[in-house]
Amino acid sequence: MKKIIKVLLGGLGISVVLCSLFPSVFLKDDALWTFQGNVGRMDVAFAGDIQNGCLEVRGDNVRADEPKWLLDNRHNQGAMVSFPVSYLKKTYKITLKPLGNAKDISLEMNFRGPDLRIRNQRKPAYVCFENIRVNGKTVAEEQMVWHDKPFRHHAKSIPVNSTVTLSFEIRKPLSFADIRWECVIGLFMACALLVSCFDPLKRLVVGVNKKDIIQIIADSYRSIDVVYRRAFWIIFGVLCFAFGFHAIQFMWGNHDWDFVGGFISFPWDGRAFEGRYAVFSLKKLFLGGVYLPLIYDVTAFLFLALNAVLLCTYLKLEKRVIYFVLCGLILTVQPFTLSMMYYVHMLPEVFIGVTFALTALMLGEKIAFDKSSRTRKVAFFLLSIVLINLSLAMYPVLLNTIAVAFVGRLLVQSFHWDGSWNQFKTQFTPFSVSAICVALGIVLYKGMVAFVFPLNKDVYNTQTLPLEQLPERLWTLFKQCFHQLYEYPFPFISQGILWVFLGFTILIALHIYLEGNVKQKIVRLILLGGALFSTQTAMIVANQHVIADRIELFGLVVFEMLVAVLIFTELKKLHNLNILAATGVVWVSIVNDLDCLRVWKLGFDAEKMLWNRVLARLETQKGFDITHKYKVVNIGSLMPMRPRYATNSTFGQGFSLPLVSFSYNLHPFDLITFYAPKNFVSLKVWLRGNKMLTDLETGYKIELKRLWEAGILDKAQAWPHENGLIVWRDIILIVTDVEMLEKYKRQLANEFPRQPQNTP
């Protein structure tokens, strides 16, 4: 009875923690708004006839907007204030500073709930405002409101340039009917089962072993094989050397800018629409949804080194430090890794997903081969399924890693098979447990993205390939898996490394052909080809066939490590030659990493300097007003400056993601978020044209038509000419391609033959 009580309490405690950390998973659709950000709301507008007035709004976690519907007939004065609301009580203090030209100003305040719409129908999302105080005076004690039934307060005779402080406590009501009880009960049962199965964990929690946690961790670390420990720290140290410049220089890219500045907090399910519903969960849990430079990179290096050791262990590489280090570095230090480092905001989570996948495969093998209790095997089985699911939820492309590692493990096992049918069953049948775990994990993942986190079909590479296109796709992938053995479409990948691994693969194929009987040869060649084809597994059902370095990192590079493991394991007569070749691969990879980082950094700084020049000139433009919102129209492409610093001959043959810095993919005016006033950040609309006018979006075409009819395009020149940047009304025009400008002018003249006006 005592054991049962402990299990129930442990399961209850873990369930409560998980429900608190990820509450929206356990809420029905109509209650999900409860945990969304910026859902508390207060509309403030001037009362009376106030000319040229404005309203400054200040407060923690407060966002103030000026929607058109609020400003109509009020002389562009007022603000819609939104702020986070917790299901727990929280006190907010919001300061309003009205400015105008009248002696007395009155404010109309409407306290509302969010504008919640489910299936295009507005729902009554209630928020409770308690103890509303204006200038220290209580105007209402408790008001339950939603969007269509606000609480209204009219603050009269507020002096100009005065400060009105609003203090109130707000909370959201949450009832038991809003909870998915089936999910809560299922979570409790799973947690209780896990607690009952893991004796070491129970001893750690309840203190049965009478050791403090530091001693337990130290003993656990010393119990790890010394080869694994040494290899891990050597690989980690080399990773810090190869990629440390990226970490200490804070060379962020892609989406990282907003997150590192804290302007946007990662929602834990922020990429759920792409099937990556767990990729931000750890960041949300431990870092509050923001990105920490340096620490984040180092954490990624730790898991990279751990993955290298785990994969070597799973593939049964001989326990020698030099073997583990060389194979681990082949997996981790090739420039492919930089393609993932371009997405720093999700870097550790993706490599943690690899750890989950490898751990799941090892647990499946442990169930099959180790003698342990049935209860423990069931727990390992369930845990393996969950880990496979989580790894795919981190990054679906990790299906490539799972497939290559599993087929590679079968290939390694085949070298211990004597060719008889009886031993075939004893050697390979146990791996069916791992296959079942992987299959059920994929089914669980598909169920999650189908029913809990539906995919957005319009998002890149999320839609499933139509069945009738599958034969053509399989043939395309079959050709691609062999093509990648002799040609990489990525810069900074040495051709010498390519030939080394091609030679290694041929050596393994020859070894298979020359050793063993016919059955062994057939099975091993099939498994070798299967491991090679597994590098494209994720592309079998994807709506688009994508060849990208960040994808090959989790398929092709894993296959190369498998080949290196087989070389060290099966071709021991070439021991010294293999070590020399592997060392050369690692050395050349590190040199290429450093060269790529050099180009990345120089181009990064040069492009940032260029955009600072653009922004500096913009601020000096006669027609520019920092309080206005503008549409930015760019004619021509803004080519990156990185190629000027690249000496690699393959740079022009492809464009690798590690070399794509922020200003090429993202809106350049996002940079001003870091040092400009908030009103200046209202440069939101970025319209860029680099193709035929007839193919352009309607919005871009309309703005070009306005510029054409006003004669602005007639005087425009290419940057850095003084007319390469023009501010006109609500448009900022940037011209970087004079040929593109002339083409647009000819097309506009044909389509809109009105004679352009002369504009001073």
Image (spheres, helix red, strand yellow):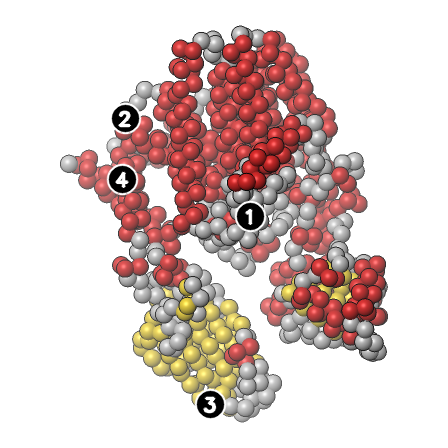
For image coordinates 63% across by 20% down, the residue present is 505
User: In the image, 181: left or right of 340?
Assistant: left
Q: What residue did someone put label 4 on? A: 192
Mark 4 Cα shell of 10 Å, populated few (<14), some (14-19), many (≥20): many
Q: Quadrant of the C terminus?
A: bottom right
Mark 2 Cα shell of 10 Å, populated few (<14), some (14-19), many (≥20): few
**Residue type indicated by callout 4:** Ala
- Dot 3 or dot 1: first in sequence order is 3
Q: What residue did someone put label 1 on? A: 345
Residue reaching furthest front? 468
The image quadrant that residue 139 belongs to is bottom left
User: In the image, 665: left or right of 707?
Assistant: left
- Dot 2 or dot 3: first in sequence order is 3
- Dot 4 or dot 3: first in sequence order is 3
**Residue type indicated by callout 1:** His
User: Is 103 drawn above or below residue 169 in the view shown?
Assistant: below
**Residue type indicated by callout 3:** Ser
* Callout in the foreground (4, 3): 4
In-front residue for pair 505/95: 505
Q: What residue did someone put label 2 on? A: 374
Mark 3 Cα shell of 10 Å, populated few (<14), some (14-19), many (≥20): few
SS label for mark 4: helix
- Dot 1 or dot 4: first in sequence order is 4
